[in-house]
Amino acid sequence: MSARRLILPLLAFFAVSLALAPARAQSQAPAASPTPGWQATPWADSVMIQTQLFFSLATPDGKGVSEQQFAQFMEEVVRPRFPDGMTVLDAYGQGKGGTGGPLAMLHASTKLVILVHPNTPDAQAKLTEIKAQFRARFGGSDIFHLDFPVRIGS
């Protein structure tokens, strides 16, 4: 057997062992104290929030929401409530859904709307209105909503 055939597997073994060693050491060692002057930011008091709204374009009646219908909804409902701007992305969603039996995997075209807004009750009320109007307009279509505290920088 050549020396090269023996050395390469040993090198790979040591490389993996070295890569995993810090993770093992961290899990067993006590937490290091933070850098002097460091303070945790209380996210609950974050000034700005990034909201991600996932609008399913599938409707319970099977007709779906067209591009034109969604654009009209954005102009009439979303833009007046958040006029400072947003990002809209095309996405593809899948998840479990259905009622009264085994849950089937649902697949649907999705619009992802990303908003950055103040962390205020007014903004949260506007988001609630947007979701209610989407469900009312499009026969109960699904909306998935995530919020993240953010810092804005350039």
Image (cartoon, rainbow, N blue to C red):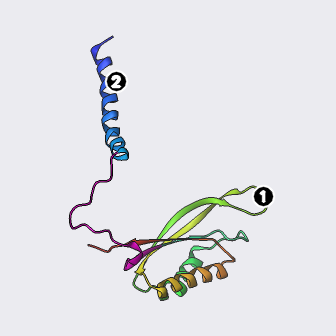
N-term-proximal mark, 1 vs 2: 2
Left or right: 126 as drawn, with respect to 4:
right
Residue 103: % across, % down: 71, 57
Q: In the rendered structure, which amino acid carries the disc numbered 2?
A: Pro
C-alpha distance separating marks 1 and 2: 51 Å
Magenta residues, as a range? Answer: 29-51
Callout 2: SS:
helix
> In the rendered structure, does residue 78 fall within the stretch colored magenta?
no
Res. 107 image quadrant: bottom right
In the displayed structure, 94 sits above or below 123; it is above
Left or right: 110 as drawn, with respect to 33:
right
> In the rendered structure, does residue 45 fall within the stretch colored magenta?
yes
Callout 1: SS:
loop
From this viewpoint, which residue is outermost toward the top?
Answer: 1
Instruction: Give the crowd class for mark 1: few <14, some 14-19, many >=20 residues within 10 Å.
Output: few
Residue 150: % across, % down: 37, 72
* Label ID, residue 101: 1
Task: Report the residue at 25% width, 66% height from top.
Answer: 38
Task: Report the residue at 43% width, 86% height from top.
Answer: 83
* Label ID, residue 9: 2
Q: In the rendered structure, which amino acid carries the disc numbered 1?
A: Gly
Instruction: Give the crowd class for mark 2: few <14, some 14-19, many >=20 residues within 10 Å.
Output: few
Res. 92 image quadrant: bottom right
Left or right: 149 as drawn, with respect to 94:
left
